Each structure stands twice: as structure tokens, then as C-alpha cells.
Image (cartoon, rainbow, N blue to C red):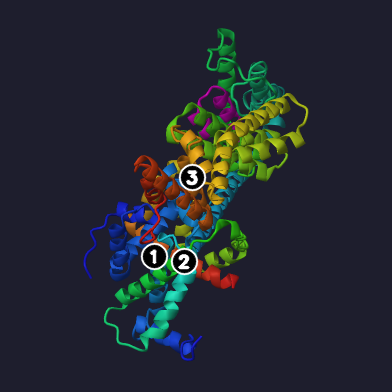
Amino acid sequence: MGESAKSEEEIREYLLGRVSDEAALEGIEELLFTDEEFCSRVALAEDGLINDYVLGRLDERDADSFRTTLAGDPERCLKLELTQAIRAKALALNTKAAKVTKAAKAAEAAEEKPSFFARLGTLLRQPAYAGALALLLVAAAVSVIYFNRTGRPDELAELRAVYQKERPTEARISDFGYAPLPQLRGAAPEQAEKNRLRLIQNRLIEAALKTPDARTHHALGAFHLTQREYADAIREFESALKLDGKSAKIHNDLGTAYYELAMASGGEKRYENLAHALEEFTAATELDGNLLEALFNKSLAHEQLGQPREAKQSWTLYLQKDPSSPWADEARRHLSRIADEQTRFKQDGQVLQDFLDAYRNRDDATAQKIHNETKGLLKGAAAPLQLSRRFLEARRRGDEAEAQESLDALAYLGRFERERHSEFFFLSWPTSTRTSARTRSSGC
Amino acid sequence: MKPGKEVTREKFAGFLEWLSPGGEGAGEEYERLRFRLCTFFSQRRCRFPDELADETINRLMLKVGEERIENKLAYCYGVAKNVYRESLRKERHHVDVDEVAVAAQPPPEPNFSEECLEKCLAELPPESQQMILEYFSEVKTAKVELRRRLSQSFEVTQTALRVRVMRTKQKLKLCVQECMG
């Protein structure tokens, strides 16, 4: 039994299906069977991958590769399901524990009151102090009412009033009425408005410090969201969810924070944040299927994630529940935009379909004509590009027949180019397509 | 199936004995072998890796009584490779796409049973139960602190903690599978 020099990174790449070199693959497989320590490391690495996926710690590329491996690995699917179930249980227990702690603290505070009132009762029996004490009580009551306001009804109403004409976020914040999105986002508020906002903020912070419950954290989170302070908003919403994990509105607003953060981000972070947003919107709609804000936002998220079919379904569902508000008009505009884009894409799709029809019917002249007319295009309609995409999508779905046909069609184009134009570029395309899909078949 | 070629209880017992002479730890060895085989076939993008793993084990069971094998695991690897190549030959026949009916989606697997998970969690030793629930209760911001605290409270290194989590999950998986029948 030799000592394996494979690194954790190599094992991870193997488990994510990203080792394309046949020799390297065989080397790993041999170790997997013959080296007990290596086998243990692989098992541990797989468990670690599953845990990381469930805990949201994989980056987009790794998460994508991981998901791809699930289609052909029922054992891994089962392990994933188990881990997800344990996670859900752990989080549920967390929330329950937080509530129990809060209830215990409230009970403790209640026990002290009788002794305070008992002392007060003694004092009141002395007439000389009764009047003074009564005055003191009235003053104390006024102070309690003034300083112990949770802030939510007044401050949030004021906050909503500030944004009556233009809304601060594209995604909807719970209980905020309709206002159009400003043409120029990020414009600085006027001084009077700044002062008003500062006052609102102070009161909300005070309320959250005095009475740190789900409502005050939620309200403060909403404020941060309107000010584009997304990290602060997320922190407050997550605090609120720890105390009340079943609030659809809090889930929605947390999703809005992630959505807005995504719109302000670029690259991989954008998609990661959008995925978080979609998770939260979905959680909100599962808790309350009639929460219009969450339904609206979920449709936005699908659209931004480049999922036109899901977006279309989601917008349509939204309009069934809200057919007539100004939000509904926006929803209709989104649906119309999706339909326009699908019409544009259909043109590329039509090229592919026409090519495949000709190829299947052995109509070489037509197939070659379509290829000649589109091969110069760098993206979109070119037949080899679309065939490669079709191959990869078919492999992902497990449709081997479609995948094989795509490869055969690519090889056909390659032979055509070689025979007619002595061009070898297209002949190598099937091989590179297979490599990029990480096919393992020997001789393929 | 040819007479003498069917898998019987005796052959299975003989196979376990071959895997782990003396019987101790045979179950664990069997699970490890199955893990190796499933990983091998799934990473090779085979369509039904668990079925191919079972096929490999069946062939091993039939063979181990018939001949003397020096290096067991290398032999298992060899049989797995043969099963893999055969599976490729079956898949490689080119089919006219117009004649192929698209395969129906397999029926959805039954949902993971919450009741079974509850039962199996309750059967774990209290320390293991606490550890695994705490491990998965982390929120992102508390991750590093939580891992450090868990490692300290269970007096283990971070790697050992991961191993304990994995083993606990393996026990839970077997328990839940048994509970779900």
C-alpha cells in the first residue's frame, strides 16, 4: 500500500467530475480501491463537499459542478437529502431555543414586578406621600409611553411616506405601497429629507436596542434597505429571522436585500446573491402563498437569473392574484419583455432545427448551405456552436440519444469542412466538446 | 441464470468472510467496497452507478469461492472495470434518433422521512446528537467560531471533527434507510 500524493484539491476536482485526463483518472481510481487511507480521504472529502453545499459555502462554479454530479449519483443524492434534513432540524431547534430563552427572560422580569408594586402599595398608604407618588406615577407613565414606543407603526409609516413618489429598490419591500422606480437611481436626497431620515433611523435604532425582537430588527432592516445599506439590512433581517423564522415578510425583505445587493454586484457575486434572493423569496411564498411582494420579487429573480420559462410562469401567477394594481402593470411589462426576447432567440433556434431536419433527411446540400451561411457568426446562430450547446444540455439531462446525435452532426460538419475546404478546425470540435463535457468513454 | 451462478445467502456470507476474515468489521468493509464502486461508476458518468455496483458485487460473490485471489481490492477494481466496459458497449450502439422513444422520467424517490430521522437522531448517543446538530446549525458569520468551539468542547482537531460528523451521518443514513424499509 503506497502513500498517496494526491492533494485534497485533486480529490475535490475528481469528486466534482472535473478530472478530464484519463491517466489521472485511472490513477485516482486505482488508489481509491487499493489504498485504504486514500479511500478514507475521498469519503471524507465527499462528505465535506456535501456539507459545504448544504451550508452554502461552495462558490458558483463548484456548486454548479456539484449539482451536475447529482444526476448520475443516487447515493450522493441520498446523502445530500439527509444532510439537508439535519440542517433543517438544527435550524428549527435554534429558533425554538431562541424563543425559549426570550420567554424565560420575560418570565423573570414579570416576577420582579409584584415586589415593586408591593413596596409602592406600602408607600401609598401614607397620605403625605400619596399625592406626590401619584404625580410621579403619572410622569413615569408618560415617560414610559414616550420612550418605550417600539417605533414600528410611526417610524415605518413615516419611512414609507418618504418613498411615496419613487421607490428605493426595484424589488418590493413588505408593506411598502406602489411607487415607480426612479429614472436616475442613487440621486442624493434633499436636506429636509435627510434630516427626516436621520430622525427615523435614530428612533428605529433606539427601539431595536430597547426591545430587540423580530419586529424592531425587521423595521431597522427595512430602513437600511431603503438606504442601500445592504450588509446592515441583511444583518438585521437575519437577526429578526432567528427570533421569528416563520415570518414570510421578513424572508421577503431579506430576499430583497440580497436582490439589490446582486444588482449592485458583478460577476460571480451577482449570481450568488441572486440565488440567495430567490431562496428567500421562495421561502416567503411557501410560508404565505398570497404574499404579493414575494411573488413579484420571485419573478424578478427568475428573470435576472436568466430563467425565462420560470419567470414567465411566476409573472403569470402574480397577475392571477393581482390583475389590476400598478404593480400588475409592471408585471405585464416584464412578461412582454420576456416574450420579445424569446422571439429573438427563436431565430437562432430555428437555424438549428432547420439544420437538424436537413441532416436527418440526409439533405447534404441544405445542411451545408445552412452551415456555410452561419459559420462566420461568432456567437448565437452558428450550427456548430448550437450543436455543442445542445450536446452539453442533453448530457446534463441524461439524454444520451440527443447527445450522440449532436456529436455525430458535429463530426459530419467537420468532415464536410475537411473535404470541401481542407479546414480541420471543425473536425476537432466534437473532441473538444466531449472533453468539455468530461466524457470518460474510451475510444470516444 | 445458469445453475450455480445465482447469488445465495451462503455465497453472500462467504463473500463477507472473504472481505473480512473472522467476520469482525465485515459489514463496514462491505459498505466501504460499495462506496468505492458507486464512486467509481458515478464519476465515470455511468447511468445507473448503484446497479453497476451491485452487478460488480454479484460477480465478486460468484468468483471468490472459485479461485484464490491475492490482492482483493485490486481484483475488485478489475471486475469493476470489466463491468464498466461492458456498460459502455451496451450504451454505445448508435440509435436512429427518429426511432427512439424518449425514456420516461423515473418515478420520484419517496421523500426523506422526517419521522425516521427524528427516531434515528434520538437513538444516537447524546454527545453525537449534540455535535451533529450544532455543526449544522451554524450561520455564515459564526462559522469559524462555531468550528473552534466544537473542536474545543469535544477535544478534537478540526479534521477529527469532520470525521466524527461523517461517521455520525453514515450511522444516521443506515438507520434511516432501515427505518424507511
Q: Is residue A291 visible?
A: no
Whether residue B14 appears in magenta in the rendering, the answer is no
Quarter placement of the C terminus of chain A = bottom left
Report which residue position mark 3 lands on. Answer: A387
Whether residue A219 appears in magenta in the rendering, the answer is yes
Mark 2: amino acid:
Pro
Residues marked 2 and 3 touching at CB (< 8 Å): no
Subunit bearing disc 1:
B
Q: CA distance from mark 1 to mark 2?
A: 8 Å
Judged from this view, the residue extending furthest toward the right is A324
Judged from this view, the residue extending furthest toward the top is A191
Subunit bearing disc 2:
B
Q: Which of A146 and A268 lies nearest the eye of the viewer?
A: A268
Query: Could you tell me which residue is drawn at 50 percent across and 31 percent down?
Result: A262
Q: CA distance from mark 1 to mark 3?
A: 29 Å
Mark 1: amino acid:
Phe
Q: Earlier in the sequence, mark 1 or mark 2?
A: 1
Report which residue position mark 2 lands on. Answer: B49
Subunit bearing disc 3:
A
Query: Could you tell me which residue is drawn at 48 percent across and 55 percent down?
Result: A404
Query: Dot 1 surroundings within 10 Å: few (below 14), some, or many (20 or more)?
Result: many
Residues marked 1 and 3 touching at CB (< 8 Å): no
